[in-house]
Image: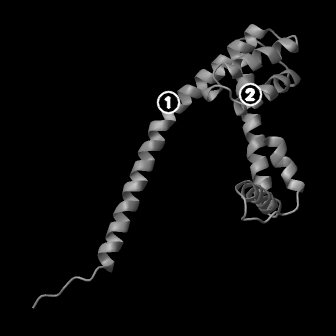
Amino acid sequence: AAVASVGSMFLPRIRSDRNWLLRKLSAVTGAWRELRNEPIFLLRTLGLAVGQFVAFAFAFWGASLALGSELGPIEILAVASPGCLATFVSITPGSLCFYEAVIAFAGASLGVSPVGCLAAALLTRAVLAAFLVVLTPIGLKRLARNTAESNESEAVSEMAEEEIPVTE
């Protein structure tokens, strides 16, 4: 699917309403053209992806330091790259165990202790889970409050728009 969507970047614009498949292909080629016409959006997306990778590499580096495994920057990048990719290509929900296996394999292929890499991956996942356990209720409470405020302001504006009959 990824090869087909990247390949569709170079297809001419297809316009067709005759066939279900041609309509879908037309939507894909049109979407790529829209993305190519907005380089700021693409740069912002690229910046977010690079930031996510850097944060992932720092988290793995911190976890390996906490476990007493001092890996150099090259080893961290070499192990973090397939690990970050494993989070996108998840075979299981949340890439559970797949991410850890990729990290351990990448570490073993570099001559780093696979047990140390596995422990660092598990520590990284535990810290992320704890972080989400703390932040999720805060975010949900804020979302509920903003939704309630939005609903109240809509109700007030609807009441202001309604005409109130005047009795004599």
Q: Is residue 127 left or right of residue 9?
A: left
Distance CA(mark 1)–CA(mark 2)? 22 Å
Q: Quadrant of the N terminus?
A: top right
Given the current orientation, which residue lies at the most extreme left position?
A: 168
Residue nearest the viewer, comparing 117 with 14? 14
Q: Residue 61 carries which label?
A: none
Quadrant position of residue 83: top right
Residue type of the residue flagged with mark 1: Val
Q: Provide residue 33's location: percent of width, then percent of height.
A: 81, 61
- Circle nearer the N terminus (1, 2): 2
Compared with 75, 139 (above or below) is below
Residue nearest the viewer, comparing 12 with 100? 12
Q: Is residue 57 left or right of residue 159?
A: right
The answer to whether residue 57 of the structure is visible from this angle is no
Given the current orientation, which residue lies at the most extreme bottom position?
A: 168
The answer to whether residue 8 of the structure is visible from this angle is yes
Tag 2's secondary structure?
A: helix
Dot 1 surroundings within 10 Å: few (below 14), some, or many (20 or more)? Answer: few
Q: In this view, does 37 lie to the left or right of 153?
A: right
Quadrant position of residue 60: top right
Compared with 127, 11 (above or below) is below
Q: Provide residue 85's location: percent of width, then percent of height.
A: 77, 31
Tag 1's secondary structure?
A: helix
- Which residue corresponds to the image point at 32% horizontal and 70% vertical from the top-left? 156
Q: Residue 86 carries which label?
A: 2
Q: Which residue was labeled with disc 1? A: 133
- Which residue corresponds to the image point at 77% horizontal and 10% vertical from the top-left? 114
Residue type of the residue flagged with mark 2: Ala
Quadrant position of residue 80: top right
Dot 2 surroundings within 10 Å: few (below 14), some, or many (20 or more)? Answer: many
